Amino acid sequence: MLTIKNLHAEVEGKQILKGINLEIGKGETHAIMGPNGSGKSSLASVLAGRDNYTVTEGEVWFNGKNLLDLSPEDRAREGVFLAFQYPVEIPGVSNLNFLKTALNEIRTYKGLPTIEGRDFLKLTKEKQQLVDFNANLMNRSLNEGFSGGEKKRNEIFQLAMLDPQLAILDETDSGLDIDALRIVSNGVNKLRDAEKSFVVITHYQRLLEYIVPDFVHVLYNGRIIKTGTKELALELEERGYDWLKEELHLKESV
Amino acid sequence: MMNSNEIIDDIANKEYEFGFTTDIEMDIAPPGLNEDIIRFISAKKNEPEWLLEWRLKGFAAFRKMQFPSWQHFEMPELDLQALSYYAAPKKKKQLNSLDEVDPELLATFEKLGIPLNEQKALTGVAVDAVFDSVSVATTFKGKLKEMGVIFCSFGEAVQEYPDLVKKYLGTVVPHSDNIFAALNSAVFSDGSFTYIPKGVRCPMELSTYFRINAQNTGQFERTLIIADEGSYVSYLEGCTAPMRDENQLHAAVVELVALDHAEIKYSTVQNWYPGDKDGKGGIYNFVTKRGICKGNASKISWTQVETGSAITWKYPSVILQGDYSEGEFYSVAVVRNKQIADTGTKIHHIGKGTKSRIISKGISAGRGDNSYRGLVAVGPRADNARNFTQCDSLLIGNDCGSHTFPYIESRNKTAMIEHEATTSKIGEDQIFYLNARGIDTEKAVALIVNGYVKEVLNQLPMEFAVEAQKLLSITLEGSVG
Ligand SMILES: Nc1ncnc2c1ncn2[C@@H]1O[C@H](COP(=O)(O)OP(=O)(O)OP(=O)(O)O)[C@@H](O)[C@H]1O
Ligand SMILES: [Mg+2]
């Protein structure tokens, strides 16, 4: 579904991604871990098409299309979804109106009829329950004054509503209380199926106990330096990243 | 793919949609401002002596006045002698019905979306159409008359209802109020007159549509609206002008009088030609609008959506003279390219228990410059007067400006005055967030702007709110993709 080849990207003249290779198949869930500042959110931003990042080398293919050629909105319409690490607040725009606009833009792109009134509300109700999203937040301005946890839940609620093929969750677990973590993870698990793929960026093994990944990658200094299965996350939890960094330096000095 | 900066720069390239001109035979006076031209206008309109006297008083006041200098923009040089002060479509004969209006004129208004044919007209809206300086048609006059509502051109009111005109003309905006009002008093050519009798709730929206067409003319019309005791009226004003390279002056005066328990709602959707992207051409919109809540528990509410004009300079005001009277001002002002808007309101609390509410939403894009200037004055008699002011600015791009000048003068200790102000910018991260959900940049900006102006647009009658929303997205179109 998604193929990333030798991806290099810079921001403000600074090289951040230094040759990422990653293959994500249909129905797979990949976890990306790595120390602060290693480039995890940058990778997510580049995939979503944030324009302050410049891709200097490499390719990204999504379902046979050159993703890097598409505008951010077309990437979303093609089925790429990014749950932001820091969702922004948009005063004056109601959550409900925003979601309806987004959903209908995507549907129109796919040649589907727009969804209005009762059908939309029905869908909203159904998906709200999936992530136990507080209905009062629906009529408020988008993320304005939402608590940290409410913003994260809103991201997952949007994910459920927009039903993308590839969802990238950037530290969705941080800021969630223990119960919320369980609820949100269960929601994500219900969305998983053979057609959909997930990239879960996290610092904590705990999340991966709920959302069990097929692969775990460690991103360090703009590169994936280790790939393993869910056991790798446990090992990282115990040992931290230093042993990996050392391994890397040893390899590089050879 | 355009990035947000390119998209924002692109704002300048959106064309003005109403820029066509109409070819029609006109009566145009030679340029120049002097007593002769005033006598000429007055004679042309067959006015009574007292009105000529009043005009001449206005002209005398005008000659003693200087252009003001307190505004927050560079005042362009205005050569008032180079303008022609009378331009009217040539009438073949006395008009008895709409069918006799020049088809060219009807076509012009139709093109502007203002059909004057009553069958085609918007139901529930009566229109007085003003072309250059002269009212060319008023719809639904007969129907309104059955209820005692007078809605006609100013010139007609002078002939038919001279006592009413004489009683109220200049009582809210005196002939010497300010230099543009004085000029208007001297040379005004036509406008709209409305009288709602006691206890009548006007059954339809009344509306004036102003169209400037002729070159090198100024447009000076007067509107006078009187709502007698316990009556209600909602009045709308719209306007456009052709694209011309030179600037044109629009100096109108609007006077509103609300008697006991009466309510006047006055809405404006202003879309004069704003000039091109380099600031060439466009209308100078220097308008004096003022209402007086003369009666107890009366109410005047101004709502304005200002998107056009090279320079907009106006402060619709309310004098709250009656006890427990209420004044409101709701405003959206958009500037882009090199447009300038210096607008706001003045509320004078005189009676006791008077209330006012000011909601101002400025939007600046391109190199536009937007100022809010507001005065809330509370007099010694105005016990327990209350004011709430909310004054917001929204910036799109990095080259635009916004300024807020609130003035508060309170001479009563029991008054409660609240002022809130915010400035926000449509951030790239907000746009990107919406993009990442499948919404393109243009829609994203429209979504944010619509949310921002909602509180004001909600004040407009339904059809006009929709129009205004469309106008806003057209105005901001280039700015966003
Ligand atoms: N706009 C920017 N200008 C300059 N540097 C940037 C910019 N955006 C990101 N960076 C830098 O890129 C590097 C990678 O940042 P990124 O946010 O991708 O890290 P991360 O792996 O997501 O970290 P964390 O775990 O803390 O979220 C950091 O050094 C960061 O400072
Ligand atoms: Mg991050």
Image (tube, grey):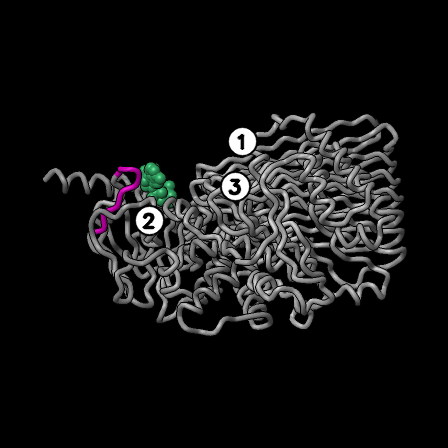
Whole-percent x, y for residue B472 in the image: 54, 52
Q: Which residue is mark 1?
A: B77
Q: Which chain does the numbered disc 2 sit on?
A: A
Q: Amino acid at mark 1?
A: Glu
Q: Does residue A231 appear to the left or right of B213 in the view shown?
A: left
**B222 up-or-down from B25: above or below:** above
Dominant secondary structure of the magenta stretch? Answer: strand
Q: Residue at x 52, y 71 (%)?
A: A115
**In front of the other: B201 or A118:** B201
- Residue range of the region highlighted in magenta in the rendering: A7-14
Find the distance from the CA under tag 1 to the CA under tag 2: 66 Å
Q: Are marks 1 and 3 in contact (CB under 8 Å)?
A: no
**B269 up-or-down from A253: above or below:** below
Q: Which residue is mark 3?
A: B247
To which quarter of the image does residue B408 belong?
A: top right
At mark 1, the secondary structure is loop
Q: Which residue is mark 2?
A: A33
Q: Amino acid at mark 3?
A: Asn
Q: Does residue A138 appear to the left or right of A114 in the view shown?
A: right
Q: Does residue B219 appear to the left or right of A251 in the view shown?
A: right
How crowded pointer 2 is (Cα within 10 Å; few <14, some 14-19, many 20+) is rated as many
The label shown at residue A91 is: none
Find the distance from the CA under tag 3 to the CA under tag 2: 63 Å
**In front of the other: B185 or B12:** B185
Q: Amino acid at mark 2?
A: Met
Note whether residue A212 is visible: no
Whole-percent x, y for residue B440 in the image: 42, 57
